[in-house]
Amino acid sequence: MLKSDAQADRALKSIDIESDLVIIGGGMAGSCCAITAARQGLRVVLVQDRPVLGGNGSSEVRLWILGATSHMGNNNRWAREGGVINEILVENMFRNGAGNPVIFDTIVLEKVVAEPNITLLLNTAAFEVTKSAPDRIAAVRAFCSQNSTMYELSAPLFCDASGDGVIGFLSGAAFRMGAESRDEFGEKFAPSADYGELLGHSLYFYTKDVGRPTRFVPPSYALRDIAKIPRYRSFNAKDHGCHLWWIEYGGRLDTVHDTETIKWELWKVVYGVWDYIKNSGEFPEALNRTLEWVGHIPGKRESRRFEGPTMLVQQDVVEQRPHDDAVSFGGWAIDLHPADGIFSEKPGCNQWHAKGIYPIPYRTMFSRNVNNLFLTGRLISASHVAFGSTRVMATCAHNGQAVAMAAAICHEQRLDPPDVAKTAPLGELQQRLLSTGQYIPGVALADPNDLARQAMLTVSSELQLAELVDNGPLLPLDNAWAMMVPLAAGPAPRITLVVDVDHPAELVVELRICSRLGSYTPDMTLATQTTDLAAGKNQSVSIQFDAHIRTPQYAFYCVKANPQVSVHTSEQRATGVLSVTSGHEKKVASSGKQSPSADIGVDTFELWRPVRRPGGRNLAIRVEPPLEAFAATSLTNGIARPTTAPNAWVADWQDASPCVTLQWPEPQRVGRIELSFDTDFDHPMESVLMGHPEDVMPFCVRNYRVYDDQEKLLHEQQGNYQTRNTVRLLPAAETCSLRIAVDAPHDGVPAALMEVRCYAD
């Protein structure tokens, strides 16, 4: 029994924690930052003011995690973010194909608590900053409401990933809120006053069919006049969760301090919307549906944005401007919303895509006037317009990983964040990020300690793509379709299609490339061939263009729409080869061609997108001469995803025992092997709500074995589904060669390996 006499003064329990890095905010950016830093050996304190991790991606808000892939609705191929955020999304696909947000919570939490270097403080709100100098944070105070404990958190480095930037604000870091004028940065898409300067909050609801009629009596505060919502006729009994992202409000208010007011208005709207769906009589299909869940906290889009030494602007996004200090990338559309949200007469969003992904510089990720403060998540240094693209969660998480690695360099070399922007540490930052799976456009990994770079590589076979066999269903050419294939410099190869023709017709095929090397918008037509076809089945059509490819890149063999023609398809799939169709994904575009009506500083171009599996088959084609883009040399070129080439070794379809052998003239000590497999970086892997037909990507090698020069089995893996595998050999092997034997994942998919690295440790 605890008993205390009356006292005049009492204090809350207080705990002091010293660490190397304090991260405020446990959304996807803060969580991925913490995991990355902890794996680099830093002692990390992760402070989250909610009971779960994941922020807008958690079960409290239930927004799907997206980034540059943009629901596969843009022209950004193979653009899913790498590193820890990719690891989490791939894990979620394997465990949680139905998109259950509660299960996603467990996956993120498991990744964090698995790291012994992380001290996790949930339900803990940071509220005070102590400074040792005007430009330096010494400590942060935080309070946990659940254990009534005060924490004093001191460290040489701090990272604000809190969304609203509470620590940046309290520390005096320079910030902005609202939109810049068009004149400040020359951003033609900067919004007018009537459109508004801030994006609002959203709050979602879930429904389910309980198999019998249910009643809904709305609470007294529910919105009664549904016609106050100009787009109310867009509601239906099927859509729920973040499909209704446009239930948004608050852009005319203070999105930091008025959040509770905004939440109440959103509650009124949500319950009013469900009242309309259940009780208006217009939706008889809702008879058996009940309201299963309503969010208790809104998902925030925008509040404070902090200033770094540089600021990302519209032109960086649209023009895909290179940056010497690039450490991450983005690719979501510039996506601005009317400040009046759901009560606006305007469309719910105004989205404009770039032709490809764009680099994000390190100098946007630390404060320009508080020397030991990193910025990540939606706090990075970006204009309101550029923020319309950088704000999405997968991009935020990728930025968080970059911050974590910079913090590791600061810790090891006794530097402050601005010091890492200098040449030597910046190069180290980029290389270390690449070594952990981060992707940085235009930067390749070149690790001098990698023994694989010193080895002679031989393989059992290399795919020479001469044919995608004709074994799939017919595809009517109601839309234009294209095969994206990796071409070497030189004459464009001949391809042969197989078609069925209902009535005499013309078949028009174009050879296109992208005007920006490394992007995938087919905006340059190199040649066109028109073929007259008679009615009939199984007709071979030979396409020979008089065109020359100047530099290795992806090209599009575009077959124009013609409803009289159906093209034969193939069930075969291979790493780095993809079919796309012209048209749009309704979630991210209103038509198949981006055509701004005014000069707003964005490009006009067509959208060519893949169709999700199990659809989206390749066209059945023959290629002469065969494509030779799948060589073993790709394994050590420092790029582990398709870019201008597949960047993968792919075995021949007929190879019964695919393997890679690394040979050295003298015995080498090998203690660690890093392998990268193809988990289809083109797939967005939306984390919740949507669900997916696959739990493992079809290109991913599931089973492999590693042998030494005496054919001794050193390691065997069964059932792999992750992108990156670290093989630790205990004890380390002394060997003149390693043979990595891989099994083809499916009959119609050849074995592929993106990267091999070997180290002594």
Image (cartoon, rainbow, N blue to C red):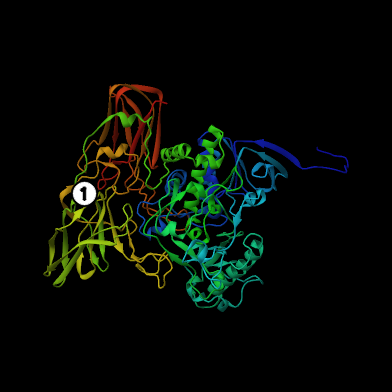
Q: Tell me the residue at 46%/60% (across/down).
A: 314
Where residue 510 appears, as percent x and y from the top left, is 21, 62
Q: Which quadrant: the N terminus?
A: top right
Residue designated by label 1 = 489
Q: Answer whether residue 698 is visible to the viewer in this image.
A: yes
Rendered view: 307 above or below 592: above
Q: Which quadrant: the C terminus?
A: top left
Q: Which is more toward the observer, 697 or 306?
A: 306
Crowdedness of circle 1 by 10 Å Cα count: few (<14), some, many (20+)?
Answer: few
Where residue 38 appears, as percent x and y from the top left, is 53, 37
Q: Toward which corner of the image does residue 357 lie, by quadrant?
A: bottom left
Q: Is residue 609 left or right of residue 458?
A: right
Q: Is residue 411 left or right of residue 527?
A: right
Q: Toward which corner of the image does residue 607 lie, by quadrant?
A: bottom left
**Callout 1 amino acid:** Ala
Where residue 281 appears, as percent x and y from the top left, is 52, 78
Where residue 221 appears, as percent x and y from the top left, is 66, 71
Q: Tell me the residue at 61%/76% (across/down).
A: 224
Q: Answer whether residue 245 is visible to the viewer in this image.
A: no
